[in-house]
Image: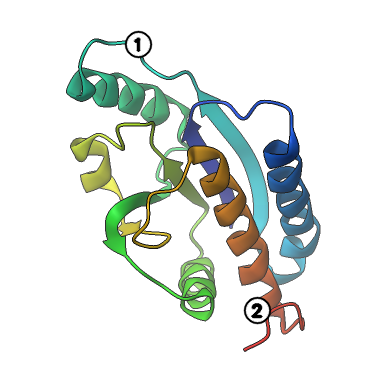
Amino acid sequence: MRIGIFAVGRLKAGPEKDLASRYLDRFAKAGPACGLEFSRTVEIVESRAGNAATRKREEAALLEKALPDGAFLIALDERGKAMDSPEFAEFIGSHRDRSLRDMAVLIGGADGLDPDLRQKAGIALNLGRMTWPHQLVRILIAEQLYRAVTILSGHPYHRI
């Protein structure tokens, strides 16, 4: 199963981008052994519209254009479900085992995701109840994808 990250905004060169890239590289190298492949990161430009609803709608349209047909969508949203790392790994593994071709992790802009796009997601997940800068969200989800691969493969990276 191919997994991609689809985000509003760009990570500029610096430590955040380096760390996210490090985890995504680890995921890309370890994933194929357990049937997971990192497909890509897609970054779309933040809307400059005058109000939040229009910004979210414009950003959602750009995200949707970039998504693979039929992809299972994971919306990162503060109102979403909380999972621990083993639950997230099991979730990824169960979708892989159903021969799902593509999975897309959606990261909205500063205003969040458009409600219509969020509704299309198979699940909304939160990364905790606190608000995180988008740069850190990229790092957190990249690390959790790598951690999921290590859990699924029995690697000792994840310790309980």
Q: Is residue 78 left or right of residue 160?
A: left
Mark 2 Cα shell of 10 Å, populated few (<14), some (14-19), many (≥20): many
Question: Which residue is drawn at the image coordinates 30% and 19% (left, top)?
Answer: 58
- Res. 17 mark: none
> Where residue 70 sits in the image (x, y, percent)?
40, 45
- The image shows residue 93, relative to residue 133, as above or below, that is below
Instruction: Decide which of 98, 73 is in the foreground and name it.
Output: 73
The residue carrying mark 2 is 151
Relative depth, front residue between 29 and 108:
108
Given the image, on which type of amino acid does mark 2 rest? Ile
Closer-to-camera residue (132/77): 132
Q: Is residue 147 left or right of residue 4?
A: right
**Residue type (three-letter) at the residue carrying disc 1:** Arg
> Considering the numbered disc 2 on the image, is that residue within a helix, a strand or a loop?
helix
State the residue lying farthest toward the front: 130
In the rendered image, residue 152, in percent from the top left (x then y), is placed at: 64, 78
Residue 141 lies, in percent from the top left, at 55, 54
Q: Which badge, 1 or 2, comes first in the chain's sequence?
A: 1
Colour convention of the picture: rainbow
Q: Residue at x 31, y 37 (%)?
A: 112
Q: Are marks 1 and 2 in contact (CB under 8 Å)?
A: no
Q: CA distance from mark 1 to mark 2?
A: 41 Å
Label 1, residues with CA under 10 Å away: few <14, some 14-19, many ≥20: few
- Figure quadrant of the N terminus: bottom right
Up the image or down, 50 lies above or below 95; here it is above
Q: Residue at x 43, y 38 (%)?
A: 69
**Residue 48 badge:** 1
Which image quarter: residue 10? top right
- At horizontal 77% and vertical 83% (from top left) the residue drawn is 156
Name the mark nearer the viewer: 1 or 2.
Answer: 1
Q: Regarding mark 1 in the picture, which secondary structure is present there?
A: loop
Please indicate whether residue 123 sits to the left or right of residue 6 in the image. Answer: left
